[in-house]
Amino acid sequence: MPAGVRCPGCEAIVPDLPELRTDHLYVGAAPGCWATYTELIGRQMADPGLFESRMLSVDVYMAQHPGVPGRQSSQSVWGHLIGLYLVFERGYDGIASARAKARVATPEATFEWLEPPASMGPITVLDVLATTTADEHGAADEHGAAVGRWAASVWAAWAPHQGAVRTRADAAVDRRHGR
Ligand SMILES: [Zn+2]
């Protein structure tokens, strides 16, 4: 195994892969962590039963790797935190969450930088990938449970900003119903 480096987002120790520079420069992830994430998404895409897990995994990973202050990174963090809120506290599925996020991120919308918490929670993409056994019976549930624990830990880590996220998401979602 190559020498490990600590991911600046989730703090996992991942292989140092300097040849793999992410195209998503606003994402605060070590290349080795990003490579693990793309492997996870690839496995989830191969199994239609993991659709909801995939939708949630995108929100969790991006919220766990906020990067540095900037217009694009601020909007990304807000969008994915709103996704976590809608799934966890309002019971949305992945499609409904995506539609709601689109209503929040209008072209004229601006998003202030949310100072990331000191810890992004104890669970990382490495833990979730380790539970993926896509061809074993019942693996989808095991995988879904792991994604759920990961999501819960990251949402809890962002506790200082949960109130702001709820307020903004509720305003966008409820506006649709004539309020
Ligand atoms: Zn990471």
Image: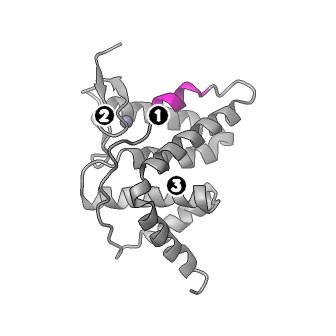
Which tag, 2 or 1, sits closer to the chain's start?
Answer: 2
| Residue furthest right in the image | 137
| Residue identified by numbered label 1 | 125
Q: Is residue 35 left or right of residue 103?
A: left
> In the structure shown, which secondary structural element does the residue marked by tag 2 occupy?
loop
Numbered label attached to residue 30? 2
Region rendered in magenta: 125-132
Q: Residue at x 54, y 81 (%)?
A: 175
> In the structure shown, which secondary structural element does the residue marked by tag 1 occupy?
helix
Numbered label attached to residue 84? 3
Mark 1 to mark 3: distance in Å?
A: 16 Å
Quarter of the figure that contains the C terminus = bottom right
- Mark 2 or 3: in front is 3
Which tag, 2 or 3, sits closer to the chain's start?
Answer: 2
* Mark 1 C-beta to ligand 1 under 8 Å: yes
- Residue 115 lies in the magenta-colored region: no
User: Looking at numbered disc 1 in the image, what kind of residue is underneath it?
Assistant: Val
Which tag, 1 or 3, sits closer to the chain's start?
Answer: 3
Q: Position of residue 81 (x, y in %)?
A: 45, 57
- Residue 131 lies in the magenta-colored region: yes
The quadrant holding residue 14 is top left
User: Looking at numbered disc 2 in the image, what kind of residue is underneath it?
Assistant: Ala
